[in-house]
Amino acid sequence: MRGIEAALHVLEQVKSGRLASEVLRKTADINKMKGADVSLASSLIYLAERKRELWENIYLDFIKDNSKKSELPELVKDTLLIGTAGILGLKHFAQGVLVNALIDNLKRKKLFQWVRLVNAVLHAVGEGGNAKLEELKSSMSLRDRAIYSGVPVWSIPVWEKSWARPELLKLFEYISQPPLTCVRVANLDEASRAELLNNLKAQDLIAPNYKDDLSSQVVRLNTTILPVNIYGFDKGLVTAQSESSVLAASLVKKFYKSGLILDMCSGRGVKAGQILSDLNNFKDLKLEAWELSTPKHKSAFKELARLNIDKAKFNLKNGNAFDLEPDDTPKFIILDAPCSGSGTWTRKPDSKWRLDWDKLDKLVYTQKRLLDRALNLCASGGFVLYITCSLFKNENESVVSEALNNHKDCVEMPVNFNALSMGDEKISPFKKGKPWGCYIWPETPWLDGFYCALIMKK
């Protein structure tokens, strides 16, 4: 299966709720696709999903017959989506080759009656699409700027309730930039770290403005890359993890004193691995991790094994965080709550199109219940670290505010981060919540939008 056909297949599967990355991996394996085709499919899928509403708006503008717009078959819509995204988004791929391949696929699928329209529209996109991009980019309309940045139109009222207009325009600008891979580096001595960096440089992966700081846990790369292809990944020397995620989890090291650590929604175990590595010097350290998803639970075992974490230091449980009970009273709880992921939409683009107001309200309800349970489980004198990868106030300050109102024995602790080095400059992408917690803005391609609030139980 070629790259363009594979991209269309993946888009079809994504509509049924499947993750684009997982479908692409399986499609590539089954069809024994070569590297170039996998790379092309991945690029097209990412481009299409990242700014789906933008590409739809552009190709619909070039369909002159309005009656046709409501009659488009799903494959024709996907063909126009992939074509428009590829023509306007791919820098090193011939427009004619892309259009011809898409037209040939329509013919193979016996959609002959749509060939003429698709061909005309895609050629019009090639001639006039960039002008429409510039028009949206420079527009004073928040809706136009959202569409250009890949922000779903339905979510605009949520953004407006969270940030002032100047902040929103800046956030949309950050969201429009493609993400790059960041890796967390294992605790290594100076010589071993230098050897690791030299090998990453040999792979031509180090970002141009990166200057090594021995105190930093992260190395910024100049591309996006599958973790298994990064030098040192198989030995547990590096872990693909956004810089925001690393910063959030590092708060545990700053405040942990003793006792059981509970990771209530542990996912694939990336943060658990970081925490266990950071606190390796604590002899009696024990971390318990809960995860509802069985596949993610199994992945967490593999992740901790890859990092060579001592099995005696953790206990992974598969189940619902509302039903499970910890082995001991936890002194520190990490609640990386399920959320809209609005801070990571640029990195995980297919997730944002599955959301709507109703699903967001259900997420907020779940977040409030989870934080309430965490505070009930936490030992006196202990801490609960509430984390989301969302930039929406109703998933963050509003949740924390209600929790503090219901738990009079709890107080918020200040969360402070040091400025980040960017070459010879320093940046501080940290914004105080209003009034609770702290945001990490996605100011660089290695940062995702995150929120952290640390609560101490008296």
Image (cartoon, grey):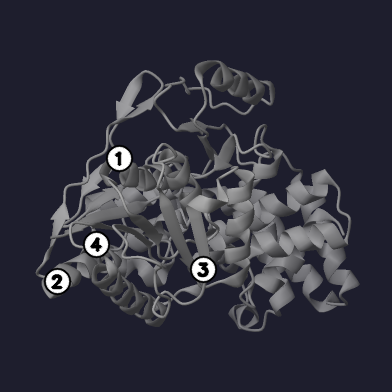
- Secondary structure category for the residue under label 2: loop
Vertical position of residue 141 compared to residue 97: above or below = below
Mark closer to the chain start, 4 or 2: 4
Q: Amino acid at mark 2?
A: His
Of circles 3 and 2, which is in front? 3
Of residues 193 and 52, which is closer to you in this image?
193
| Residue 136: quarter of image | bottom left
Q: Residue at x 78, y 57 (%)?
A: 4
Q: CA distance from mark 4 to mark 1?
A: 17 Å
3D distance between C-alphas at marks 4 and 3? 35 Å
Residue wearing tag 4: 162
Where does residue 36 sit, x and y in percent of width and height? 81, 44
Q: Residues within 10 Å of mark 3 (few under 14, many from 20)?
A: many
Q: Which residue is mark 2?
A: 407
Quadrant in the picture for residue 295: bottom right
Q: Tags 4 and 2 in contact by the CB under 8 Å rule?
A: no
Which of the two discs, 3 and 1, labels the residue nearer the N terminus?
3
Q: Residue at x 31, y 26 (%)?
A: 426
- From the top left corner, tell me how far across and down residue 264 is, in percent: 40, 65
Going 44% across and 60% down the picture, which residue do you hit? 288
